[in-house]
Image (cartoon, grey):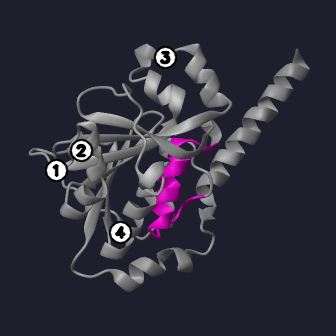
Amino acid sequence: MRKAIATAAIACLAIAVLLGLGILVPRPFSSEDAHAPFRQTFSTTTRTVLILSSRIHTDIAFPADADVIGRFRFMARDGLDPGMPGVAHVIAGWGGRSFYIETPTWADLKPGPVFKALTLDRSVMHMALAGPIDRRHPDVITLNLPPAAFDRLLAAVSDSFMRGANRAELPLAGAQYGPYDRFYEARGSFNALVGCNVWTARMLRAAGITTGWWTPLPGLLTAGLALHNDKELFVQVPGAR
């Protein structure tokens, strides 16, 4: 029994050390290279994106501006036009096909999707439309990006879709939570250790933002962002906690 307890304690300590290093070690390692796009391109014109967090998942919310609507106009073919009146944000997320589609709420949790998430699963993109989002909410982070960095982020998210004939995105028929979201085939395989939050971090790095080296949970992602980036990246929202 003592040996089992000691082994479990060592395993927990090892996981804690890995998670700590995942935050403390920056990615990319050279902060000068990471911040160069911001130092070179910041001007009076900036764009904002939101990072939306839940207990285990993060999404990226783009403003429903003309270039964003144009990039995701393909959604209109599937009955969800990002240019429709009342849309303020286009939200993008990446995740495991089984868990993501079959678990819209914790009440829907089932063993099969959990097993696939912990082993290996195909990936999907989840696209949703939303109205105004309260930036004061504690699970919302507002990032302030130079136009060039915003364009790189938008391009990286777009490049996460798997495409078929004529470079068309591949919707998953009947896979949605409600009237304002759709699922699409995505590039790459999913595993919980390199899951949705690791994808979000990779998208942000494409824009020139530094993240922690390994951020499998939302809290690790946001902690790494705060640790490794200049304060000019973050929009200070009055009243936010």
Q: Quadrant of residue 180?
A: top left
Report the disc number at residue 76.
Answer: 2
Instruction: Tell whether 186 sits left or right of 63.
Output: right
- How far is mark 2 from mark 3, CA to CA? 30 Å
Image point 51% across, 26% down: which residue? 99
Q: Nearer the viewer, mark 1 or mark 3?
A: 1
| Magenta-tinted stretch | 194-212
Q: Which of marks 4 and 1 is nearer the N terminus?
A: 1
Q: Which of marks 4 and 1 is in front?
A: 1
Element marked by disc 4: helix
Q: Earlier in the sequence, mark 4 or mark 2?
A: 2
Question: Mark 1 = which residue?
Answer: 83
Residues at discs 1 and 3 in contact (Cβ within 8 Å): no
Three-letter code, disc 4: Asp
Question: Mark 4 = which residue?
Answer: 151
Q: Quadrant of the N terminus?
A: top right
Three-letter code, disc 3: Leu
Neighbor class of circle 4 (other Cα within 10 Å; few <14, some 14-19, many 20+) is: some
- How far is mark 4 from mark 2, CA to CA? 22 Å
Q: Nearer the viewer, mark 4 or mark 2?
A: 2
Q: Earlier in the sequence, mark 2 or mark 3?
A: 2
